[in-house]
Image (tube, grey):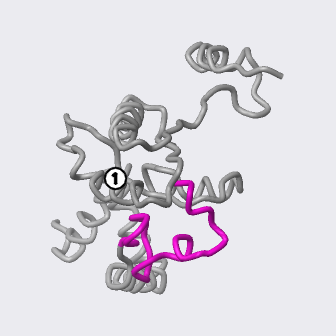
Amino acid sequence: MKAPSSLEDLIDALRCLPGVGPRSAQRMAYHLLQRDQPGAARLAAALTQALAKIRHCKKCNSYAEEAVCGLCSSPRRDATLLCVVETPADLLMMEQAQCYQGLYFVLMGVLSPLDGIGPKEIHLDRLVKRAADGVVREVILATNFTVEGEATAHYVGELLRQRGLKVTRIARGLPVGGELEHVDSGTLAQAVAERREV
């Protein structure tokens, strides 16, 4: 017996989520229909509302309901510092750590030529314009330490240095509370290379 087409459409739609395969999508669809129809309605309404209201902040490129988000419009932020991150989730992590009081620019990805993602797709033209506004004094590159993140940081760093901006990169090394015997050799080597005087 074949499932109704609307059920197949729901299962197929759920597969767009990262890490959700056909079986997981099927389980989610049946759960929503059998056990949590109010939750399904709430999910549908929230998605519809988010798609209608959320856009990119004109300054930092993160998600916002206004033209300029609350962080970018806050007078308490240090406008001379600009931190470049890959995703809005990375921005939230920086904010939760409470270690940074400047402004941000969210790339919404990283350079990945094999996936067809170049400078245009990650809005580097907007980043350069923002960083060269005459207010920003330092750009902190906080992309992930993946191959793509490192390549993006290098490319962005060269691009901004050519415009006379000070560019720094977040450090990497041992996690707080980490033990040497449980750390991979690459992380340990990087921690030794980036040691500082005490």
Res 101 quadrant in image: bottom right
Image location of residue 47, percent across then percent down:
37, 78
Q: Residue at x 34, y 38 (%)?
A: 162
Q: What SS does tag 1 mark?
A: helix
Q: Residue at x 50, y 56 (%)?
A: 136
Q: Is residue 75 above or below residue 134?
A: below
Q: Quadrant of the N terminus?
A: bottom left
Position of residue 23 in the picture relative to residue 186 (left or right): left
Q: Residue at x 78, y 20 (%)?
A: 197
Image location of residue 151, percent across then percent down:
35, 31
- Which residue is at the front of the view, 2 or 126? 126
Q: Residue at x 20, y 77 (%)?
A: 6
At label 1, counting other C-alpha atoms closer than 10 Å, the crowd grade (few under 14, some 14-19, many 20 or more) is some
For the record, the magenta segment spans 56-82
The amino acid sitting under disc 1 is: Val
Mark 1 sits on what residue?
A: 128
